[in-house]
Image (tube, grey):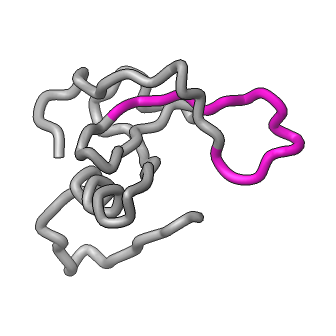
Amino acid sequence: MDITISYTKEVSLGKDYLWLAKLLARSYQTLVATDLPEGHPDKMNPYCWCVAEANGYLVEMLEDLSDVEDREGLLLNSDSKKLLTTVGKLA
């Protein structure tokens, strides 16, 4: 499933997108993939994702690029999972 959230400059959520990803992950007991935070060394890598887990942790994971022709959606490589600790204050 893909969710896109758009809002105007005049609307302030009071929280950032990492907080929202963690809230969705907890609420639906699932993984939520989103962009890496600003300042992360792999921010420009289109195959590296920030993933919010249902337990509240943020991890970074690489996209699994094997067999891209037969898959639907985003497939992450669980072997690449590591705790997101490279950025100062997290959501």
Viewer-closest of 28 and 46: 28
Q: Main secondary structure of the magenta part?
A: loop
Residue 82, relative to residue 11: is it above or below? Answer: above
63 drawn magenta:
yes
Outermost residue on the right side: it is: 69
Q: Nearer the viewer, residue 72 or 34?
A: 72
Identify the residue at horizontal 64%, vertical 46% (top origin).
74
Horizontal side of residue 32 vs 11, given as left or right: right
Question: For this view, does 54 lie left or right of residue 32?
Answer: left
Residue at position x 47%, y 37% in the image = 49
**x, y (%) of residue 56?**
23, 46
Q: Nearest the camera: 31 or 38? A: 31
Residue 71, placed above or below residue 49: below
Pick whichever, 63 or 24, lies toward us: 24
Q: Position of residue 13 (x, y in %)?
A: 18, 71
Q: Which residues are magenta?
A: 59-74
Instruction: Tell me residue 7's x, y (percent).
Output: 34, 77
Q: Is residue 85 above or below residue 58?
A: above
**Residue drawn 54% across the image and 19% down it:** 79
Quarter of the image with the N terminus is bottom right
The residue sitting at 81% across, 37% down in the picture is 68
Measured as percent of width and height from the top left, residue 80 is found at 51, 20
Which quadrant of the structure image shows residue 29? Answer: bottom left
Query: Is 82 within the magenta?
Result: no
